[in-house]
Amino acid sequence: MRLLKRDRKKEAFWRRMMARQPSSGMSVRAWCRKHSVRESSFYWWRRQLARRDAPAPVLVPIRVGADRSASDAFERSAVSGALSRIEIVLPARRRVRLIGSVDRQALTDVLAVLTSAKFLDAESSAC
């Protein structure tokens, strides 16, 4: 893997360019043409700077292990025995338990809300 050294002058140049374009009232294509900038470079730098400015992702610790406290009711209801089970332990010992198939996007959305700083602040002030 090749690590590229950031060119601070180039980054500063593109930050100025990104700040000027919206207030021009011109389309990106017209603005780039007027300023002799390649449109593809403009879009590449816009994505690059957005990535650089994005907050670092919040990592949530997980532990994978056997759940020895499964209820008898669940065991009786598992006809095929092939249901998947996921348990997510959140701060303040709250748990999210999922049984069966799970829509990945829905789970992602729920976890984003439950691990957001806004939600965690509201929960801690409610306790």
Image (tube, grey):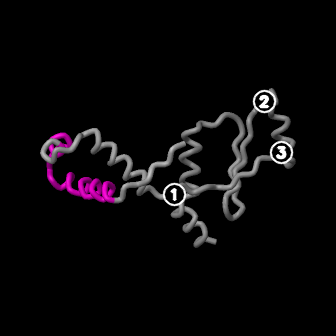
Q: What element does badge 2 sit on?
A: loop
- Label 3 crowding class (10 Å Cα cut-off): few <14, some 14-19, many 20+? few
Q: Position of residue 114 (x, y in %)?
A: 58, 56
Q: In terms of secondary structure, what is the magenta stretch mainly?
A: helix
Q: What element does badge 3 sit on?
A: loop
Identify the residue at the far top of this view. 80
The image's mark for residue 66 is: 3
Q: Which residue is mark 2?
A: 82
Q: Quadrant of the N terminus?
A: top right
Question: Foreground residue, 40 or 8?
Answer: 8
Q: Earlier in the sequence, mark 3 or mark 2?
A: 3
Decide if residue 45 is on the left or right side of residue 107. Answer: left
What segment is highlighted magenta in the picture? 9-32
Q: Is residue 12 magenta?
A: yes
Q: What element does badge 1 sit on?
A: loop
Separation of marks 3 and 2 at Cα, in angstroms: 15 Å
- Label 1 crowding class (10 Å Cα cut-off): few <14, some 14-19, many 20+? few
Q: Which residue is mark 1?
A: 56
Q: Is residue 23 magenta?
A: yes
Q: Nearer the viewer, mark 1 or mark 2?
A: 1
Q: Nearer the viewer, mark 3 or mark 2?
A: 3
Decide if residue 98 is on the left or right side of residue 15. Answer: right
Instruction: Please state which amino acid type lies under the numbered disc 1.
Output: Ala
- Residue in the picture at 71% in, 55% down: 89
Q: Position of residue 99 (x, y in %)?
A: 72, 39
